[in-house]
Amino acid sequence: MQPFGFPLFSSSPTRFLARLSLTAGFVAFTLGAANAHAWGLDDVAALAAQRAQTPFQNKPKALPAELANLSYDEYRDIRFNRDAPLWRKDKLPYEANFFHVGREVVSVRMHEIVGGVAKPMRYNPADFNFGQNKLSPQGWGDVGYGGLRIFSNLNTPDVKDELAVFQGASYFRALGSGQRYGLSARGLAVDTVGAAKEEFPRFTDFWLERPATDARQVTVYALLDSERMTGAYRFDIKPGDNTTTEVHARIFMRAGQNKVATFGVAPLTSMFYFGENQPRAGDFRPEVHDSDGLMIASGDGEWLWRPLQNPARPLTTSFSMKSLKGFGLMQRDRSYRSYEDTEARYEMRPSAWVTPLGDWGAGRVELFQFPIPDETHDNVAAYWVPEKTPLPGQSLDIAYQISWQGKNQQYPPNGWVTQSRRGNGFVLANKDGSLPPNLPTQFTVDFAGPALDNLPDDAPIKAVATADVNGRVVESLAYKNPANGHWRMTLRVQRVNPALPVELRAFLQLNSNAVSETWTYLITP
């Protein structure tokens, strides 16, 4: 694989198309015989470049009627046979199995790379247990697969646990030791906001590289396709306490297409139903979410923390910067007592921290949130929007690492928010029992971290808080919490026009130095 420069835009995909005639013959050749050239990202990129020069073909493979008519529960009764995983017979450090196709599960093509040669993996009904379903798979032909799962000795040397999943559009996710699935990543976000309809690129083909007997990572290649975009992806997945997924991508915009409204790189998708800043009356659980905040590290050294919300209406905010060091949707609160859910175990859901590999240049981190009625829906998306995006006929090379983190998380170097609560304490009511109109909004925010933990109680810590033109900070206090040694900030903010939002920023300062990340919050109308 050739090295990447960032950002790298080519005026056209000519450098790939020049090899296409050779590539077509090469692919056919490698499927039948060994070749000195090892299959890699350049080969997938050649296929993506070829697709970028042709109209989008949105014609998923038709399913046999008896498969297409399965109910949700009937489909869930189809399982991959436990004794049939790829690579098990050879006792390799990783194994893989596959999802079956179904009514809402689109077929994808699978290949295995052995000795640098890519070979197609045809559907075999003998690999599946169809449960109570009365089906006749022998007459289906090659229906493909619905996605893939990868297993490794993640938690114990005796059992291979699920490590990563690729299923649905361009979604994928992974687990570190002791974690349970929560948020997901995507290959690309297109027009999530700013357009009439979001475009969902999907992975149509996968290549699984057969691991060596001592492999410390497993590699998967994928080909992406959508109305306006194509792309080639390489995923290097390394298991551990914090499993990492290193992503190298080459993305093309289809010739003759219009520029996208939002071009989202390294998108993350999560769920926030309610939490400490937005409690829900009537639910016995204190919090329900897969992520509780967006964290950003800008190139100029500032760290930002934005608590998530379940807003009353769709909400889009963005954070512009000249360069990016990282961003992520984080599940900071790791205590069971914060959730009290013995089944969902939200305290075990991973955070996902994205680190650019190379300089991504200027752009913005965009956060999109929308209302959900329950916890079964995702309602949070975060991604990087580069200042320069590929135009029709152009391509973009980009790389990054996603760290799926548990208790050992990425934190700012000085201090960070441990909890963020919204709500008033005692308020003197009117004689009729009503509350005063346009009551100031109160926030109680706790901070901890190496720059704060050993300070004496009387350290001159100051809460520095600002609001936009629609807000007025009427009180800002900072003091040490005697119950746990953290530093507490209390803010009271008056809205000028209650019908408009207020953007807040606040941090802790010692003398003239910031000793915490910047807490940011949007008070919605």
Image (cartoon, rainbow, N blue to C red):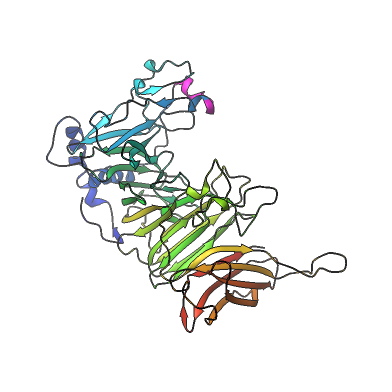
Nearer to the camera, 294 or 430: 430
Residue 269 x, y percent position in the rendering:
48, 50
Nearer to the camera, 54 or 487: 487
**Which residue does the image show at 59% across and 74% down from the upper left?**
468
Vertical order, 356 against 76 (above or below): below
**Which residue does the image show at 33% across and 25% down from the upper left?**
83
Q: Quadrant of residue 174?
A: top left
Extreme residue toward the right, this view: 432
For the record, the magenta segment spans 64-73
Vertical order, 198 against 420 (above or below): above
Is residue 259 visible in the rendered image? The answer is no
Extreme residue toward the left, this view: 36
Residue 4 x, y percent position in the rendering:
25, 57
Is residue 299 visible in the rendered image? The answer is yes
Nearer to the camera, 409 or 103: 409
Vertical order, 333 against 229 (above or below): below
Residue 333 x, y percent position in the rendering:
51, 56
Asked if the stretch drawn in magenta spans residue 274, the answer is: no
**Which residue does the image show at 32% across and 34% down from the upper left?**
96
Please count the marks in the image.
0
Most frequent secondary structure within the magenta stretch: helix
Q: Quadrant of residue 493?
A: bottom right
Assign the C terminus to one quadrant of the image: bottom right
Nearer to the camera, 386 or 287: 287
Question: Is residue 116 toward the left or the right of residue 360 in the image?
Answer: left
Residue 87 x, y percent position in the rendering:
26, 32
